[in-house]
Image: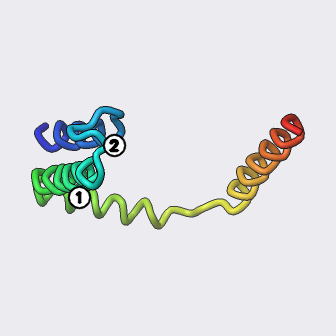
C-alpha cells in the first residue's frame, strides 16, 4: 500500500499545476520537478517486494510476446489521418 500511495502521490505531483516552487523562478522552479519525481518513482520501486516485482516482470515479458495485428494498426493510423484531414478541411 505504501508503494501505491507514493506512486500515486508522485504522479499527482507531476501532473498537478501546483508546485512546491513555482516554475516562474529560474532554475529552482524546474529543479524541484527534476528531483521529486525521479525520487518518488525510485522510492515506490524500492518499496515493492522483490518477489512481486519478479512476478510482474515475468508477466510483462509474457505479454510482450503476444501476437500483434498490423491490420489493426493500419486501420487506427488511417482513422487518425482521416480525422486530421477532416479537421484541416473544416478549418480551411
Answer with the quarter of the image where residue 20 lies.
top left
Numbered circle sitting on residue 55: 1
In the rendered image, the vertical position of residue 86 relative to residue 57, given as above or below: above
Identify which residue is drawn at 15% across, 44% down. Answer: 3
Identify which residue is drawn at 20% across, 58% down. Answer: 53
Numbered circle sitting on residue 24: 2
Identify which residue is drawn at 29% across, 36% down. Answer: 12
* Image-based side of 87 in relation to 68, left or right: right
* Image-based side of 33 in relation to 6, left or right: right
Q: Callout 1 environment at 10 Å: few (<14), some (14 to 19), or many (20+)? A: few
Question: Quick one: 3 or 24, which is closer to the camera?
Answer: 24
Image location of residue 67, percent across then percent down: 56, 63
* Image-based side of 20 in relation to 85, left or right: left
Question: Quick one: 13 or 52, which is closer to the camera?
Answer: 13
Q: Choose the circle earlier in sequence order: 2 or 1.
A: 2
Q: Could you tell me which quadrant the C terminus lies in?
A: top right
Question: Quick one: 45 or 13, which is closer to the camera?
Answer: 13
Q: What is the secondary structure assignment of the residue under circle 2?
A: loop
Question: Quick one: 48 or 40, which is closer to the camera?
Answer: 40
Q: What is the secondary structure assignment of the residue under circle 1?
A: helix
In the rendered image, the vertical position of residue 44 relative to residue 50, given as above or below: above
Image location of residue 54, percent across then percent down: 20, 62
Amino acid at each position: 500500500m505504501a508503494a501505491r500511495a507514493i506512486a500515486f502521490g508522485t504522479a499527482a505531483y507531476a501532473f498537478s499545476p501546483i508546485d512546491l516552487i513555482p516554475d516562474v523562478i529560474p532554475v529552482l522552479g524546474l529543479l524541484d520537478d527534476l528531483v521529486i519525481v525521479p525520487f518518488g518513482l525510485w522510492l515506490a520501486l524500492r518499496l515493492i517486494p522483490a518477489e512481486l516485482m519478479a512476478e510482474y516482470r515475468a508477466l510483462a515479458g509474457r505479454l510482450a510476446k503476444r501476437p500483434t495485428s498490423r491490420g489493426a494498426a493500419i486501420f487506427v493510423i488511417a482513422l487518425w489521418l482521416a480525422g486530421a484531414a477532416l479537421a484541416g478541411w473544416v478549418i480551411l
